[in-house]
């Protein structure tokens, strides 16, 4: 079986597009070949800045012949129906066959397609792939109609086996396929022919091109680490930058330079971000101090002066960039040391959302909520409120204006410069976290309070204006905010009612930024947060205190709890996704969501974890079957008799040893479960519940529920109710599958 080698040689492909492009080339080509009847053993895609390459091993030499039989209309069908069938098959009437069918004779088409040689199929598929390649952006050049990411220069397409090498003939917009390619643009620009993939890769390397991007990454990393180590420094690893730089060079040559002494006082993150974003430099730090003191740049060529000229030019450009950063830093520090009042004032003119007010309005809401949350997470309310007031002020700083990815982090530096406590500064740094499923979760109490307040304000704000996520659309990243709330609560074992916080913050949104009596409103909201005074109770209290409710109290009076319920359901759905990723079954989560206290997410997860562990035991799994049997019999009997059997079973009516043993077991289980649930020891409660498995099984084996003796029957049905009640006090087992 021959091997196929394809190379599409062009001007430089943007680094960010290369990984996707090589995967698209592999998938589109192999899918097309298989659809056309060819098979293959293995396929791999490669990319460099100037080429996309596909190597396919073990390709069949031709496609298999195909014989297809297709049933058509009846022989007596209208002429139009028969003509339509002929068009779909590509046959003529005399090529059809008459065959008997249940309802008479019908036309049958027998379509036979002979096998096709691989070169013809490859040429057809490759031309289609080239002409329809899914580049994020593409261009036309010259007078042709072909679109490619950058001008396409040549197409290498060959089949090779033991007998030799064959060029697959193909012409796309005047570009004729061949068996030649070119090496490095500067070091080995000449053309050369290749015979197969091994020959191709080896000759490219001699021509100063490393084909495999992973190999280029390894070479860059190893040499950069060696250069840093030789200077007594340490490379700051950056995998994303490493991948990007590997897509910029075909023959990587790392070079190390030093940062000017004037810039060493800049924060390490500023230096690293500036060099990464503007210059694609790797940072090099002093391992003793953690200070960034050097950089590694990766050249795409070898020079006679060993890169001295390249380094000199890079350092000149870097000095200009870092001069800007130093200017931003020094100006920002002056504002920070004066209290950041200018930034706070400036945020009044920055709109967060046209229905949610300015960034300043948002900060006021977050600060109020952070103060409410602080006691629940063990934080000082004054510090939490102060941290929330300062956390977003760096959005007006020049440094964050230049490098938005430093927001929060620069807030920490500026808060420290302003003389704020360390907990306040750290909260400014951490309040955006966690940003994703792998991001670190803040643990300092003040940071947790402000981070929770920030995310809850975002969620409640967009719920209040009915801008909820729909389908795959989530323009305001509300799913990410919900996951952030969940991870903050669970990682820090925070116990609170999410309903109360959600209700209060929705009320803050509905009350507007400047209520007429802000102090009294704040007092009402804080009391509501602490005691859960919402809905009818809140409206009753307000109506009792005010004959005529003032405008600023109308949102409180008219608060719709359905909004809060909707947001809580959204949080529950995100929690279900999160827990399923942790290995907890969806029905286990549903069984726990059906229980009281589901607005305490930490409590909910503890219950679900304990139930999952119980169900993984034999007793736990079999107990569920016993519970469902008891529940089904009881439900059917109650529906038939029109009564509820919940008036207490009496052991004096027990007729069998198994029945009496079940009474004893239920007494013991209740005695263990009630205190365990009171102290929220779900594992102990589940374990006590699981001990009922054996006596329940024995009871059903030895006892007939629907006996002729109506007194005994009612007693046994009441006993089943007791089984159901005990089990449902731990989790709603009726929600479990199976």
Image: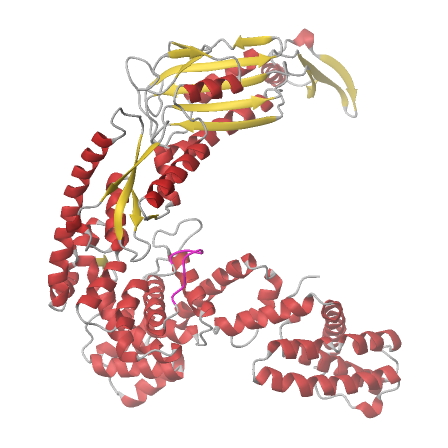
What residue do we see at 33% from left, 78% from top?
372
Report the front residue among 116 and 654: 116
Question: Magenta residues?
Answer: 435-442
Q: Is residue 548 left or right of residue 675?
A: left
Report the front residue among 314 and 57: 314
Q: Is residue 303 left or right of residue 720?
A: left
Residue 94 magenta-highlighted: no
Placement of 199 over or under 678, stated as above or below: above
Q: Is residue 281 visible?
A: no
Q: Residue furthest bottom?
A: 652
Q: Is residue 342 left or right of residue 274?
A: left
Q: Is residue 244 visible?
A: yes
Placement of 53 over or under 674, stated as above or below: above
Report the front residue among 724 and 89: 724
Residue 418: quarter of image: bottom left
Name the spot of residue 616 as percent of width and height, x first: 69, 65
Name the spot of residue 341 as percent of width and height, x first: 12, 67
What residue do we see at 67% from left, 70% from top?
614
Placement of 87 over or under 234, stated as above or below: above
Name the chief secondary structure element in magenta: loop
Tell how many labels. Answer: 0
Name the spot of residue 335 as percent of width and height, x first: 12, 63
Q: Considering the image in quadrants, where does the N terminus appear?
A: top right
Display colour scheme? secondary structure
Q: Considering the image in quadrants, where does the C terminus appear?
A: bottom right
Residue 439 magenta-highlighted: yes
Residue 515: quarter of image: bottom left
Name the spot of residue 453 as percent of width and height, x first: 33, 69
Placement of 669 over or under 156, stated as above or below: below
């Amino acid at each position: 079986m021959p091997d196929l080698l394809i190379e599409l040689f062009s001007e430089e492909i943007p680094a960010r597009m290369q990984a996707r492009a090589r995967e698209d080339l592999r998938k589109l080509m192999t899918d097309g070949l298989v659809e056309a009847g060819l098979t293959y053993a293995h396929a791999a895609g490669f990319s460099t800045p100037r080429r996309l390459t596909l190597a396919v091993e073990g390709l069949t030499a031709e496609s298999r012949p195909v014989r297809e039989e297709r049933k058509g209309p009846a022989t007596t069908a209208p002429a139009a129906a028969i003509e339509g069938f002929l068009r779909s098959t590509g046959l003529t009437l005399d090529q059809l066959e008459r065959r008997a069918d249940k309802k008479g004779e019908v036309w049958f088409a027998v379509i036979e397609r002979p096998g096709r040689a691989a070169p013809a199929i490859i040429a057809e598929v490759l031309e289609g792939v080239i002409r329809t390649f899914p580049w994020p952006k593409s261009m036309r050049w010259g007078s042709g109609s072909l679109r490619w990411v950058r001008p396409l220069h040549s197409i290498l397409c060959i089949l090779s086996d033991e007998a030799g090498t064959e060029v697959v003939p193909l012409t796309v917009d005047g570009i004729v396929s061949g068996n030649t390619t070119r090496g490095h643009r500067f070091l080995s620009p000449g053309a050369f022919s290749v015979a197969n993939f091994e020959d191709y890769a080896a000759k490219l390397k001699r021509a100063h091109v490393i084909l495999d991007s992973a190999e280029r990454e390894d070479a860059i990393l190893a040499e950069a680490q060696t250069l840093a180590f030789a200077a007594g420094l340490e490379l700051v690893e950056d995998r994303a930058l490493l991948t990007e730089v590997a897509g910029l060079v075909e023959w990587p040559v790392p070079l190390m330079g030093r940062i000017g002494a004037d810039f060493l006082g800049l924060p390490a993150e500023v230096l690293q971000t500036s060099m990464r974003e503007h210059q694609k430099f790797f940072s090099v730090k002093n391992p003793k101090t953690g200070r960034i003191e050097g950089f590694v740049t990766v050249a795409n060529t070898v020079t006679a002066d060993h890169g001295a000229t390249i380094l000199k030019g890079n350092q000149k450009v870097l000095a200009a960039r870092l001069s800007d950063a130093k200017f931003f830093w020094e100006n920002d520090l002056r504002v920070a040391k004066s209290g950041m009042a200018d930034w706070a004032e400036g945020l009044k003119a920055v709109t967060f959302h046209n229905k949610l007010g300015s960034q300043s309005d948002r900060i006021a809401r977050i600060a109020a909520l952070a103060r409410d949350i602080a006691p629940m997470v063990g934080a000082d309310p004054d510090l939490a409120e102060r941290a929330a007031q300062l956390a977003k002020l760096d959005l007006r700083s020049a440094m964050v204006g230049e490098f938005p990815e430093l927001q929060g982090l620069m807030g920490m530096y500026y808060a420290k410069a302003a003389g704020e406590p360390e907990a306040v500064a750290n909260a400014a740094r951490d309040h955006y976290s966690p940003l994703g499923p792998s991001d670190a979760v803040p643990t300092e109490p003040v940071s947790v309070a402000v981070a929770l307040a920030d995310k809850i304000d975002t969620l409640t704000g967009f719920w209040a204006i009915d801008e909820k996520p729909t389908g795959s659309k989530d323009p305001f990243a509300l799913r990410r905010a919900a996951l952030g709330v969940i991870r903050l609560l669970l990682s820090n074992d925070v116990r609170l009612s999410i309903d109360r916080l959600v209700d209060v913050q929705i009320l803050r949104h509905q009350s507007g930024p400047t209520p007429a009596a802000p102090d009294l409103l704040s007092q009402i909201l804080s009391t509501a947060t602490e005691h859960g005074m919402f809905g009818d109770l809140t409206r009753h209290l307000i109506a009792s205190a005010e004959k005529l409710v003032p405008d600023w109290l109308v949102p409180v009076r008219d608060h719709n709890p359905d909004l809060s319920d909707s947001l809580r359901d959204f949080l529950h759905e995100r929690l279900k996704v999160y827990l399923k990723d942790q290995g907890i079954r969806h029905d286990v989560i549903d069984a726990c969501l059906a229980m009281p206290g589901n607005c305490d997410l930490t409590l909910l997860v503890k219950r679900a974890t304990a139930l999952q562990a119980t169900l993984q035991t034999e007793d736990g799994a079999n107990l569920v079957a016993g519970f469902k049997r008891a529940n089904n019999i009881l439900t059917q009997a109650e529906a038939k008799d029109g009564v509820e059997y919940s008036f207490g079973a009496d052991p004096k009516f027990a007729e069998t040893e198994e029945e009496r043993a079940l009474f004893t077991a239920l007494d013991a289980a209740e005695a263990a479960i009630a205190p365990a649930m009171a102290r929220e020891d779900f594992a102990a409660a589940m374990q006590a519940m699981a001990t009922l498995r054996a006596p329940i099984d024995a009871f059903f084996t030895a006892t007939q529920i629907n006996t002729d003796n109506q007194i005994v029957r009612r007693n046994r049905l009441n006993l089943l109710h007791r089984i159901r009640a005990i089990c449902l006090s731990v989790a709603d087992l009726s929600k479990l599958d199976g």
